[in-house]
């Protein structure tokens, strides 16, 4: 992989300039399916987002200038490199695995697991924080918040009664597939911020195996290529069903996708300053239109299976939203009367 003098910042960089095609198409298709976009916005309204934040942050420690300042500064450096106007609040929580996530459509927060901060190198931690800032730049946070809310509602962790009319299962499976595509874009952001594509690859290898020393990255990359070119159709079918229920693509696939993106020359081009700026995004290409059509068909099919048809979903969500708006109006009238 090519080594280029690191750039401190990518002023005005547009996420569309490095986004994985699957991510762009899945995001656009998700917003195009009738009522799902409105359902997502409803899920991320203030009341439910507050509950999610309290649930996730109740046992976490907020980082800052007086609490693990090196990690806090590292996150802000990653945000500055991508020219983000705001940087999410940063929290550390006691979970032994190496992972992180960013939630909160209105007030984003990044949650880092203690297994990552305590067992991984500073470079690897920066790689993960850069990945999370890539999610923020690509505006994945609203959809990810809706996904986390839907998952918790389906598991019963949050009260589901007020949302009983929403097609939660359909929304969950659509967001699950989108989530896997979004990770590939954030991996590219991590490579750009760290100025070393091998670093996110090495971090993915250690996330797959655990923070074990003396692992061979070249061998893991060869493994990723072998995994892609598996000849056994039964094995390919089996791994498809294994991955389809996960929020993230398998680490070996993510490494292969990142290696192929770097090999295409796009990484070097962006690092040299030739990248798409915000506000200069071109119209969708024919290639994008094909991918968009693929995902739109898939998401509509998911809604049909889980929600008994798009029109049924539309009717159910519309009725629920109308009832909710009516209740809100009644509460407001009652408040006016009481005052």
Image: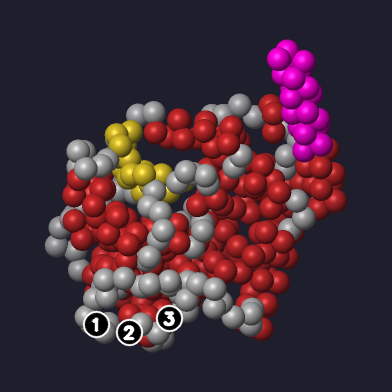
Q: Are the residues tagged 2 and 1 within 8 Å (C-beta)?
A: yes
In the structure shown, which secondary structural element does the residue marked by tag 1 occupy?
A: loop
Query: Which residue is disc 3 drawn over?
Result: 275
Query: Which residue is disc 2 drawn over?
Result: 272
Q: Which is more N-terminal, label 1 or label 2?
A: 1
Name the residue located 27 percent from the left edge and 68 percent from the top edge.
Answer: 194
Observer-nearest of 277 and 182? 277
Q: Chief secondary structure of the magenta span?
A: helix
Query: Which residue is disc 1 drawn over?
Result: 4
Q: Can residue 262 be seen in this view?
A: no
Q: Is residue 221 visible?
A: yes
Q: Which residue is farthest top?
A: 338
In the structure shown, which secondary structural element does the residue marked by tag 2 occupy?
A: loop
Q: Position of residue 27 (x, y in %)?
A: 60, 62
Name the residue located 72 percent from the left edge and 61 percent from the top edge.
Answer: 32
Q: Where is residue 176 in the image (x, y as percent from the top left)?
A: 57, 53
Name the residue located 43 percent from the left edge and 81 percent from the top edge.
Answer: 275
In the depicted structure, whether residue 333 falls above or below residue 102: above
């Amino acid at each position: 992989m090519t080594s280029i003098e690191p750039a401190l910042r990518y002023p005005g960089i547009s996420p569309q300039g490095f986004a994985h095609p699957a991510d762009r198409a899945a995001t656009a298709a998700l917003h195009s399916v009738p009522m799902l976009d409105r359902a997502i916005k409803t899920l991320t309204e203030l009341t439910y987002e507050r509950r999610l934040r309290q649930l996730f942050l109740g046992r976490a420690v907020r980082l800052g200038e007086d609490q693990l300042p090196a990690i806090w500064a590292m996150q802000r450096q990653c945000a500055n490199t991508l020219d983000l106007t705001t940087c999410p609040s940063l929290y550390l929580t006691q979970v032994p695995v190496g992972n992180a996530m960013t939630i909160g459509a209105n007030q984003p927060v990044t949650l880092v697991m203690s297994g990552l901060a305590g067992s991984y190198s500073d470079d690897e931690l920066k790689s993960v924080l850069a990945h999370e800032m890539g999610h923020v730049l690509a505006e994945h946070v609203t959809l990810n918040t809706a996904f986390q809310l839907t998952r918790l509602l389906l598991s019963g962790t949050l009260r589901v009664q007020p949302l009983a009319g929403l097609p939660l299962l359909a929304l969950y499976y659509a967001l699950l597939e989108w989530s896997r595509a979004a990770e590939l874009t954030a991996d590219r952001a991590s490579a750009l911020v760290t100025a070393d594509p091998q670093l996110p690859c090495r971090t993915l290898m250690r996330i797959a195996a655990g923070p074990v020393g003396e692992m061979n990255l070249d061998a893991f990359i060869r493994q990723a290529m072998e995994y892609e070119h598996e000849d056994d159709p039964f094995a390919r079918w089996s791994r498809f069903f294994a991955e389809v229920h996960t929020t993230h693509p398998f680490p070996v696939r993510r490494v292969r996708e990142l290696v192929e993106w770097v090999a295409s020359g796009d990484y070097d081009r962006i690092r040299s300053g030739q990248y798409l700026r915000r506000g200069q995004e071109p119209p969708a290409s024919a290639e994008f239109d094909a991918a968009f059509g693929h995902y739109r068909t898939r998401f509509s099919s998911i809604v049909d299976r889980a929600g008994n048809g798009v029109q049924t979903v539309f009717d159910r969500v519309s009725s629920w939203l109308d009832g909710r708006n009516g209740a809100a109006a009644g509460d407001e009238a009652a408040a006016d009367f009481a005052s």
